[in-house]
Image (cartoon, coloured by chain):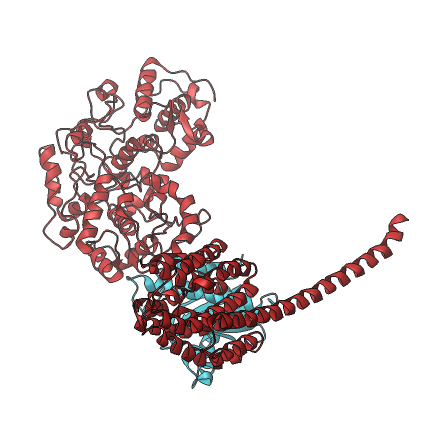
Amino acid sequence: MAVCVAVIAKENYPLYIRSVPTENELKFHYMVHTSLDVVDEKISAMGKALVDQRELYLGLLYPTEDYKVYGYVTNSKVKFVMVVDASNTALRDNEIRSMFRKLHNSYTDVMCNPFYDPGDRIQSSRAFDGMVTSMMIQVC
Amino acid sequence: MEGLTLSDAEQKYYSDLFSYCDSESTKKVAAHGRVLELFRAAQLPSDVVHQIMELCGATRLGYFGRSQFYIALKLVAVAQSGFPLRVESINTVKDLPLPRFVASKNEQESRHAASYSSDSENQGSYSGVIPPPPGRGQVKKGSTSHDTVQPRTSADQQEPVSPVVSPQQSPPTSPHTWRKHSRHPSGGNSERPLAGPGPFWSPFGEAQSGSSAGDAVWSGHSPPPPQENWVSFADTPPTSTLLTMHPASVQDQTTVRTVASATTANEIRRQSSSYDDPWKITDEQRQYYVNQFKTIQPDLNGFIPGSAAKEFFTKSKLPILELSHIWELSDFDKDGALTLDEFCAAFHLVVARKNGYDLPEKLPESLMPKLIDLEDSADVGDQPGEVGYSGSPAEAPPSKSPSMPSLNQTWPELNQSSEDTAIVHPVPIRMTPSKIHMQEMELKRTGSDHTNPTSPLLVKTSDLSEENKINSSVKFASGNTVGQQQAGVVAQPPAVPPRPQPSQAAGPVVHRPVDADGLITHTSTSPQQIPEQPNFADFSQFEVFAASNVNEEQDDEAEKHPEVLPVEKASDPASSLRVAKTDSKIEEKTAASAPANVSKGTTPLAPPPKPVRRRLKSEDELRPEVDEHTQKTGVLAAVLASQPSIPRSVGKDKKAIQASIRRNKETNTVLARLNSELQQQLKDVLEERISLEVQLEQLRPFSHL
């Protein structure tokens, strides 16, 4: 169950960012922003190797006291960043991976929509929203 | 329900209404349908309507029986009179006026003149302008709201039109317009589908309001306004399509149809099964959509790419956001392209949206693209929780589209078929041992008859089975017995087995050997084919084959083959080896018979020497590969290697006997080894058994306690 989900475009601007609507959401935005550096670092580390060999799932980008940030990059350099609650220890790596996979699938579905301009914010797709909602923590 | 006492006028009125609503004469009326329209026409707030429905028990029952209907009507009257809705008020409120339903005038309506609004009210109530969507949106309530979209609140329309219309019947409240409409429909049925393309024009051709004759009006809407490309979008609207904004003044009646009322009335009328389905596409609409599809994509089984669809639907002037949502709903298999069904669904949704319907959250059932069993299209209902997403790329054949009602029924089977659709053609499973048999079989067969063995053999390759092996053995015999075969007869034996590797199969097949050259090609290609087999034994067998490819016909050896082969078929590994033995036997015989043949002159002189040379060559080629596999091929290789050394001058019989002896020895060694292995296994199993018995014994004393 994620606390914040963000889709970042290749040019490092957000295509979609949504957090659990509590407290200071800007904090999540900031965390996502800072995580981009880590993502780039991880991408370039594999760097010389073929892009194909690079795995899409980046894993834990960096942990903080309260949260853990996971990353995922597609082959078109679109990044998915997910912030999860650090206290949620039951969350396994596989689950994170599956969540990213679902994100990726929904993202490709949005891409397939001819009425969606790549590079636009993802605001029209209810399916995408629904999927992200299902992934977010249920906050009463 | 309390007993309901109705006055005579009420009785008559209610029964008329009931018979109108009960178009199917089932003595019960669907809760969502004309009844709802009726109630909406009562100009009551929707929550009141729902309350009424609850009170009369329709929500409990799911439909309106006659009594429920009457009670509901009474409640409507109560509500319209301003009294609070109570079950008791049915009978307590005296002298209620008849419930008012805004309906167009009718001579029958005039009977209930007090309850009906006059013609004048309905005259020209439509200005031919699309009611603003929010107005429509108000009445939306889930799916049923589609039925009863009543632009009551629309500023453009003064009154909602009475939904109680039915061109086919002549219920008391049926307005003339409906009857008039019935004359117009192109299909002879007066169904007004959900706001066909017609409504599109009305916004653009607002001048339509105030047309005089019904015909003129209807046709007047046909010509699309010249303004925009949307014209092409709606250039051939079925004349009978419902024109939402159709001005009330059409014809001399006054009834103005709302999209909802017409639609629902039509659809309810049309379908005997589904009650509330405003999303159903009528045949006319369907035809129209199909025509539009053809303008973009002439092949009805093809796709419309996303870009083309985008252009097309952009012409509808809907906001991109909504178009995006429509696309999301209708592109069922998420492939970025629209099949015919998807296109029709999308078109229908656009039409609906244009008419003010709100877009559904999920694709309505009737719009779901149909899955075609065993065909490419595998789109299934999107309804979450109902059917899983089993989309597969292809399109539904348009032939199925007319059978709209069956859409819903195709789901269960579609789910099952969706997996099947992924498999286009079966992939033959390669079984190496049988491959050898296939080779043999082909060899023999091609040797026996000059017919084209390739295809039947190829077919056989695809379904290798024991029977095939047995058949091959039989054929083997027959092929041998056929006797004097031309060396070049061997057609495509090595070609068939590599069916799983079509590239290779093509190679050998291409070289239809009818002469020695073909043979040479075969033998040269066969080594290449075999090496990919992991089974080391195949190599040796292949060598044998290579040699045996040369000359099959050995009458004297023919008898041995059938004997050996059936025995060989017993166990695969052993059999393959045996085949190898046999083949090498054949090889030997070939070598032996080569000179014999030459001497006999039965076979062309050229082939025999070549095959022999080829055999040698193939052996040489194969020997390095064979050597890699040490286990059993070592023996075979040794045997094979020794073959060339056999002096050819030796008599045929002696040679043959020696070869057979050698083969048998090899077989013996192999079998002995197998035997020892099996013995070992047997010992192990026996040990296990003993240990288990011991354990049992140990446990037994306890069991006695």
Residue B267 locus on image (x, y percent): 29, 35
Where, quadrant-wise, is the C terminus of chain A in this rendering? bottom right
Left/right of residue A132 with respect to residue B242 in the rendered view: right
Evaluate whether residue B93 shows in this view: yes
Using the image, determine if residue B456 lies above or below residue B630: above
Left/right of residue B304 with respect to residue A49 in the rendered view: left
- Chain shown red: that is B
Residue B575 vs residue B421, the one in the foreground: B575
Residue for point 62% across, 67% down: B671
Residue B274 vs residue B439, the one in the foreground: B439
Residue B548 vs residue A116, the one in the foreground: B548
- Chain shown cyan: that is A
Tally of numbered discs: 0
Residue A104 locus on image (x, y percent): 42, 66
Residue for point 57% across, 65% down: B574
Residue B673 locus on image (x, y percent): 64, 70
Q: Give the quadrant of residue B690.
A: bottom right
Q: Which residue extends farthest bottom?
A: A48
Left/right of residue B566 with respect to residue B228 in the rendered view: right
Residue B497 locus on image (x, y percent): 41, 64
Q: Which residue extends farthest right?
A: B705
